[in-house]
Image: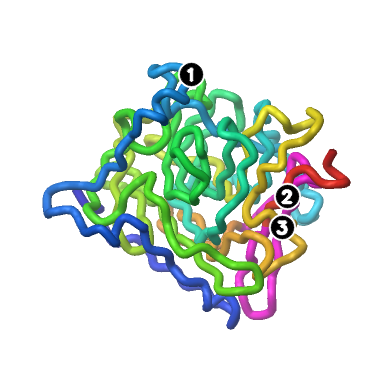
Amino acid sequence: MRPSINFPLDNSTSTKNESSLSVLSQTWHKSGSCPKGTIPIRRIRRQELLRAASLEHFGREGPQTSSLVNPANDKSNPSVINVHSLPNHSTANLLTFGHSYIGIRADINIWSPRVESPDEYTTAQIWLRSSPGNDFESIEAGWMANPKLLIDTLPRFFIRWTLDGYQKTGCINLICSGFVQTSQTVAIGASVQPVSKKQGKQYGIKIRINKDPNTEKWYLNYGDEVVGYWPYEILYYLKSRAIIAQWGGDVYSKNTKGVEPHTTTVMGSGDFASGLWGSACFIQNIYVLDTSFKLFYPEWVYVNSEEPMCYSVRNFRAPVSMPTFYFGGPGRNQNCP
């Protein structure tokens, strides 16, 4: 049940600050481990079920992330791709397209975000998508603070998939069938610790998604550990490749995009992207893998925030290093009423 091949290794260079990013551990490890032949499964509590609109939709309620691409920061490619924008979501993303992608990678900085209401949530994640339309297929992973689904606002490792833009298919974590977990050491939906501190130690999770060309399974790695895979049988367009790769954050709330007052649910650390290292949430070691089995930083990248006065973006490159994508913000403020 493991990949039949060895995927290419990252070959990034890092600055002194970037090298201090430390990998997180999962909180449940303090209580023991799973025997060989078993996997850890997070218990779904009664309170979580009672918060759902219905049992049928439990774990399938979002977030339906998307963005509108603004290529203003990259004049070298005038092409524009309009990615379907969904209501009740505010996104801040870095996006690339133009190749046939069979892999995506990133190190995602992790914080403990403020979530205003139990019906809201915030994520930092990566996506592989089949199309820019509203019926896209997508496989995703990262961290989420979602009190309605996951009982509290702790940052938790999550995965998600859909065949139709979350309208009828797919769900979060292992709540419904689809993703096949094989790891006995990584729990999907479990909280991770410690979290980053402002102007202090920075922590993050290493997420890798790669398609095995022999078995056509999309394998997910949490650090060096193979967590499991999305089988090709549950996919259609993504059976062969993805055409869009995304990195960034998403806030779900009914109080976004012109609704006042705007939510105070934060994205990332809660600071704007201009704060850079130690202040803003970031994603680094950004790679895609194409069908030639070449691992590379995307040739063309675009950044966009749907609400730049609420959540901002910045793709920053320090000398002798790969670009680092910063994103996030506090939500409601004097410029985001």
Cα distance between the residues tagged 3 and 1? 32 Å
Query: Is mark 3 in CB contact (under 8 Å) with mark 1?
Result: no
First in sequence: mark 2 or mark 1? 1
Seen at 42% across and 42% down, the residue is 159
Where does residue 41 sit, x and y in percent of width and height?
27, 42
- Checking the image for residue 271, the label placed there is 3
- Checking the image for residue 228, the label placed there is none
Is residue 80 left or right of 23 when viewed as pictured? right
Establish if 105 lies above or below 336: below
Query: Is mark 2 in CB contact (under 8 Å) with mark 1?
Result: no
Residue placed most toward the observer, 214 or 116: 116
Q: Quadrant of residue 331?
A: top right
Check residue 111 for magenta coloring. no
Over which residues does the magenta segment extend? 299-326
Query: Is mark 2 in CB contact (under 8 Å) with mark 3?
Result: yes
User: Residue type at mark 1?
Assistant: Ala
Where does residue 33 sit, x and y in percent of width and height?
20, 57
Establish if 233 lies above or below 216: above
Residue placed most toward the observer, 258 or 316: 258
Where does residue 141 sit, x and y in percent of width and height?
45, 46
User: Residue type at mark 3?
Assistant: Asp
Quick one: label 3, few (<14), some, or many (20+) residues within 10 Å? many
Residue placed most toward the observer, 10 or 214: 10
- Checking the image for residue 53, the label placed there is 1
Q: Provide the residue designation for mark 2.
A: 330
Q: Is label 3 in a helix, a strand or a loop?
A: loop
Residue placed most toward the observer, 242 or 63: 63
Seen at 56% across and 34% down, the residue is 118
Quick one: label 1, few (<14), some, or many (20+) residues within 10 Å? few
Q: Is label 2 in a helix, a strand or a loop?
A: loop
On the rendered image, what quadrant is the C terminus found in? top right
